Image (tube, grey):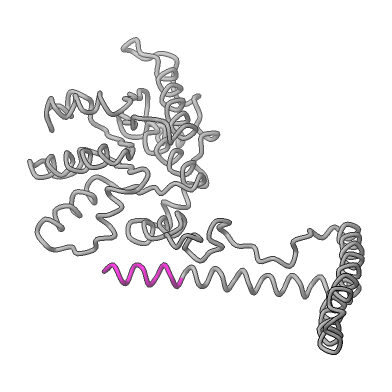
Amino acid sequence: MADSEILARVKTAFEEKRSRADSEKRRRIRSVYDKYPKIEEIENEFSRLGMENVRRIAAEPDKAAEYNAELKQKFNELEAMKSELLKDYGIPENYREPRYECGICSDTGYKPNGKRCCCFEQAIIDEAFGSTEHIALLEKEKFRAFRLDYYPDENENGKNPREAAKNAAGRAKKLCDNFDNETKGLIFIGNPGLGKSFLSNCVEGALRRQGKTVLSVRAVKLFRLMEDYKFGREEDDEKLYYVYNADLLIIDDLGTENDNQMNSSFFDEILNERIHLGKKTVISTNYSLEELQKKYSTRFISRLAEYFIISVLYGEDIRYQKVM
């Protein structure tokens, strides 16, 4: 999908959101008027008094100040009456205002300064990379749902999986709570089914709710995209832009991509640029540090230690535990 197609789809979606909000506003107002005719009478009286005041001033311009003062007094009396009725009926004062999803851009996609709103940028990321299944998971996989009881207190190697999981979750929560001031990303290491992707989703959901842009992508897809750019098979600059510029990049299943020097170079390039831009990255992998060192390089491991907080998860596959 080309840049223009992604943008067109996102713009259409935002236009539809605004249209839905405006339609809902009209239905809400009509419902209030049908149930409580007195409120509609007061609203109509505002309009009638306003038009009458215009005619009076047109006929006697020299009395404009006097007539405006009278109008203001009548408006204040009507406002007091309406507020009392709304309070008695349990209707919010702002019932006539449209309820947009984004309070920053009012679902236009653009802030007052003309720049793209974070919600619009996130919509572009989701259109280019996302899936409805993944986005739906973010509503379920939150920090409060992360259960430590799936991790034993001790395993056969003398490790404490529960303590390791608790520390990993704490580090992830700390990144979200202090995102703008944190200097390091996170890497979750461990066998499949130990909660690495769950914690990554917890971070993604929390930061999305803060208005940060998050790109979550599997390593295989990310490096295929980079390869397509290199060989001219991909011309979608929007995708490449967010690989480097999303507030948070989440790379899932690092190590599952093809084992070649090109992918290692791509990974270095992505990390270097994001570090330079002050952007943070979260990585999950089934590979141990020793395996990562063999697959990539000693330099790669040293960079992880410098720019990431490493959490190693232990225990038994949680998905297996759930079906037992």
Which picture quadrant has residue 71?
A: bottom right
Q: Quadrant of the N terminus?
A: bottom left
In the image shown, does 74 or 2 lie closer to the viewer?
A: 74
Which residue shows up at 89% across the image and 74% down it?
66
**Magenta-span inclusion, residue 183:** no
Magenta residues span 1-12
Q: Position of residue 199 (x, y in %)?
A: 42, 35
Which residue shows up at 43% across the image and 36% down it?
180
Q: Position of residue 91 (x, y in %)?
A: 82, 60
Looking at this view, name the residue that lies furthest to the bottom: 59
Q: Position of residue 259 (x, y in %)?
A: 11, 41
Q: Is residue 324 visible?
A: no
In the image shown, does 11 or 313 lie closer to the viewer?
A: 11
Q: Is residue 265 above or below residue 309?
A: below
For residue 31, side relative to residue 201 (left or right)? right
Q: Position of residue 3 (x, y in %)?
A: 28, 67
**Magenta-span inclusion, residue 10:** yes
Looking at this view, name the residue that lies furthest to the front: 62
